[in-house]
Amino acid sequence: MELILVVVGAIAVTAIAHRRGLEPALIIVVIGAVVSFLPGFEAPELDSHILLTVVLPPLLYSAALDFSFPTFLRNIKPILGLGVALVVVTAFTVAAMSAWLVVVPLTFATALILGAIVAPPDAVTAVAVGRKLGLPKRVMAILTGESLINDAAALALFSIAVAHVAGSHTFIQNPLLLFGYSSVVGPLMGAALGYVTLWIRRRLANPGLETVQGLVVPFAAFIAAEHFHASGVLAVVVAGFVVGSGTVDAGYQTRLQERYVWNSVDVLLEAFVFAYIGLHLRFVLEDLDEAHESLVEVAIASGIVLLVVLVIRPLSVFAMFSRGVLSRQVEKRLSVPVPEHGGRGALGTRRRANAPAKWRSRIDNRALTWQENVVVSWTGMRGVVTLAAAAAIPATTAAGDPFPERATIQAIAFVVSVGTLLLQGWTLPMLIRRLDLSSDDDHTYTHVETAKAERVVHKAAEEVLDDFRANPPVGLGPRVLGEIRTTIARQSQDADEMPNPEAHTLRAETFAALYRAVLIAQRAALIGERDEGRIDDEAVRAMLERLDLQEAGVTARLESRL
């Protein structure tokens, strides 16, 4: 009953925050923290692993379903830099500073747990703000891709550090080998489960059952990978990529239904997690008091960790992304032209003799502008993963002793999450507006890619209609065949001219078969052009959604005539 009340209250606060234009996550946490201090209030309790096992997989899976894998590969360099390298740098920097300053009694191992918890940013807020204010597509893609893999790196470090402090045994004792095993086996299991899911879907052919099956996939991928000591996060992400790219073979009802179902799941889970953590603030402080910790010392330590988290990201982003800009400027000013037939320029630059491999040619090597670097630097809000990982710290070690400094780590993680949401989440919209990042090139590119998709769709329809005209079915007169062609060619805008779908006449069956053939050809042509790299994946997805909505509208109008 308590959990239901938490969910209802969190959804109500989310609705109010959206209407007021506020950040729901921050408002929910603050209200939850205030409620926790009400007299006689008892916070609902969940097992420490439930938050990570139940909340994280569907959130990651939903993001992977909507994210384009070709776009992920195109921006793989900055995504890996932010999602893996920056997480490791942040975790070890926080650990070193926390252990060295000795504000609170944290060993390096326990400080590394804290570092792993606060290392991964949550891009949900940044992406939502960026979409509303029109951030460039490449920045949006980098932030979304980062959020898909940074959790895997952070949770791998978290698991290794917790196992070391708790005295429990890991599958592979060497941390580097364990990380490598987890990073390889997890995606393989996710891909296998994704293809099995698509195989089952082709045989279900029922939108309701397919949607229910989709709800099971992230949990199955996460639990199966974790059972074999691999990365459940990467398994979920890869399964989402596979299923998302394969849903073009599903019916339009399945695609439309899943889109709205997963949006609802995202809102529900995010609201619940932030409410759950906020409601435990008083009890975290009570645990600190029982552990005889000085709240002033914990507050100072929290401020230091928050400062480190806020500073390390801009420094790392500059080191990763701005070096290329500086080196190109130096080379442009100092180098001499590279000889036409090989050799080296003044700075040792050699002309490439061979063209890059096909997959490498699709990687976007363009540098971010300084304005884009600033925005990426300031999108370090911590959220669901930080709070869920803090709650997932075991209460006791393998020997049965209380886990050292558990309450201190949770309190610092709470302050860092709220602090980044407050400082960065509320100032990010103003920063984006001041930098004026809306790009005319982006709008032009989107218009061009959309026009390409429309041409592909129209050409595919014309080819099917031409074949229909050349090979008409037997038993229908020229006038009826002409009416069918004309109606399909007009994109089925007038339902009154369409046959009754339940009439089972030759005209109705011919119309339905031709309409399905046109849609199949259009979808296949779009996917083919995308796979060849001739159309941007986002434009293809947008056009596929338009075809789904069109098919849904035509079907609804046909069925309304019964």
Image (cartoon, rainbow, N blue to C red):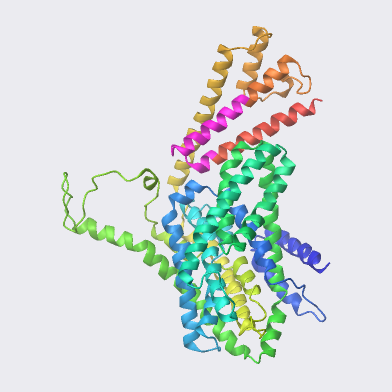
Tell me the quarter of the image containing the C terminus: top right
Residue that appears at 48% across and 48% down: 71
- Using residue 346 as the reference point, say whether residue 138 is left or right of it: right
Q: Is residue 240 visible from the viewing direction of this image?
A: no
Task: Work out whether residue 329 or residue 162 is closer to the camera in this orientation and state it.
Answer: 162
Q: Residue at x 66, y 14 (%)?
A: 483
Q: Position of residue 122 (x, y in %)?
A: 57, 64
First to last magenta residue range:
517-540
Front-most of residues 562 and 370: 562
Instruction: Return the x and y of residue 439 as percentages of the image width and height.
Output: 45, 49
Q: Is residue 39 left or right of residue 274?
A: right
Q: Would you identify the image quadrant in which residue 159 lies?
A: bottom right
User: In the picture, which quadrant includes the N terminus?
Assistant: bottom right
| Residue 30 part of the magenta segment | no
Residue 494: which quarter of the image? top right
Towards the viewer: 183 or 38: 183
Q: Magenta segment: does it hold 538?
A: yes
Q: Residue at x 66, y 36 (%)?
A: 251
- Residue 478 x/y as whole percent: 64, 7
Q: Is residue 5 above or below residue 483?
A: below
Dominant SS in magenta: helix
Residue 37 in the image, given as x and y percentages of width and height = 75, 80
- Residue positioned 49% across, 85% down in the render: 99
